[in-house]
Amino acid sequence: MADRKVLAGARVVLPTGIVDDGRVIVEGGRITGVTPAGPAAADGAAPAGAGRAPAGDASGRAVDLTGHWVVPGFVDMHNHGGGGASFTSGTVGEVLKGVHTHRLHGTTTIVASTVTGEMDFLAHRAGELSELAEQGDIAGIHFEGPFISPCRKGAHSEALLRDPDPAEVRKLIDAARGHARMVTLATELPGGIDSVRLLAEHGVIAAIGHTDATYEQTVEAIDAGATVATHLYNAMPALGHRAPGPIAALLEDERVTVELINDGTHLHPAALELAFHHAGPERVAFITDAMDAAGFGDGVYHLGPLEVEVREGVARLVEGGSIAGSTLTLDTAFKRAATIDRLPVESIVRAVSANPAKLLGVDDRVGSLEPGKDADLVVLDDTFTLVGVMRKGEWVIEPQLR
């Protein structure tokens, strides 16, 4: 019973809705109960408001989180690094530093994304990252590039881009040793549709992104098995009334989940609202697309072989000025969605936790607050500012309560 934690009094966001004055019971790193609070019950917890004890107190008294929110730990399926560390090129220690940086901001499950590079380098990198996946430090690997359009390359080296040859796609899948979770493709390129089919056959998400595809070409890719839009709106043709392009096809198809970078730089609030309106909260996944500078600060960095300057939190290529990922963390995306975009909290939780967990195939363990799942959760105050993070039953940040 020493590791038993009872969190009481908060507004708890469950798959069935919001429970006021709720209780989350944690034992052995897992959630063992989620109930409305009430008089002292058989679990031995004191009623909410009966006094505060330090988080994790083994006395049987509840941690009083009155006035706070408890939501599932965040799941980021598209992230290139943080804390000054790159997931593409950093050492094991640096990757772990980046992972920890995002945990401090509520991301308890993270996929390591690479950027365009030489095929042999990416295959070798996949092998290194797969070891971290086997240890449970990351939830898998996302390959963004090199199979993308030079017309929509963004912050990727054009010299290293290549068409999506299924044999080369298979090389990366094999190198990841079962931990490849997603590959971003410009599916209109030669080999694109066959590569989508290959990915679908191997249970790897085929994501349409950095693409110059038409509406019709995008529909063909979705029919072949593509299920994700990599950072919708960014690095693809704009929505047009005569040539609607990929955005319309991706928004209208119920088989597709759209990634959104909600940092106030990548998207206008109206574009975010449009995506939620047409796709619905069940088909939106908030991502960071973070690079090294996330949680670290302004300065000069490298994204793959390209030099990036971060100024006032916005990352741009030194040469050309293209936006180069973000410095976003998911707690900021959550707060912005709640306070600026005025989205319902349940919809935000789906976008930041449940939907990406389902896509990654880890929703049996994470993504929602349910008995039997890992005790991954985030505590927010009444302004939606992060004040606590728990991963597998242990506080990463322990709430400092008065």
Image (cartoon, rainbow, N blue to C red):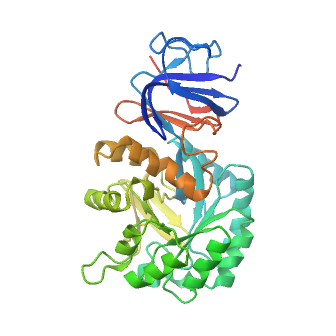
Q: Position of residue 155 (x, y in %)?
A: 46, 72
Quarter containing the N terminus: top right
Name the quarter where the C terminus is drawn. top left
Whether residue 208 is visible: yes
Quarter of the figure with residue 394: top right
Residue 28, placed above or below residue 172: above
Viewer-proximal residue, 351 or 119? 351
At a point 66% along the width and 73% down the height, the residue shown is: 201
Residue 380 vertical placement versus 289 (above, below): above
Residue 284 appears in the rendering: no
Residue 248: quadrant of the picture: bottom left
Q: How many marks?
A: 0
In this rendered view, identify the residue nearer to me: 246 or 148. 246
**Residue 167 in the image, given as x and y percentages of width and height:** 69, 84
- The x, y position of residue 62, in whole percent, is 55, 17
Where 116 falls versus 332 (above or below)?
below
x and y percent of residue 321 in the render?
36, 71
Residue at the (44%, 79%) spot, across then down: 219
Q: Nearer the viewer, residue 129 or 158?
A: 129
Q: Residue furthest bottom?
A: 190
When the figure is inspected, residue 371 is found, relative to residue 76, above or below; the finding is: above
* In the displayed structure image, the side of residue 226 where residue 345 appears, left or right: left
Seen at 50% across and 48% down, the residue is: 353
Answer with left or right where residue 240 lies relative to residue 115. Answer: left
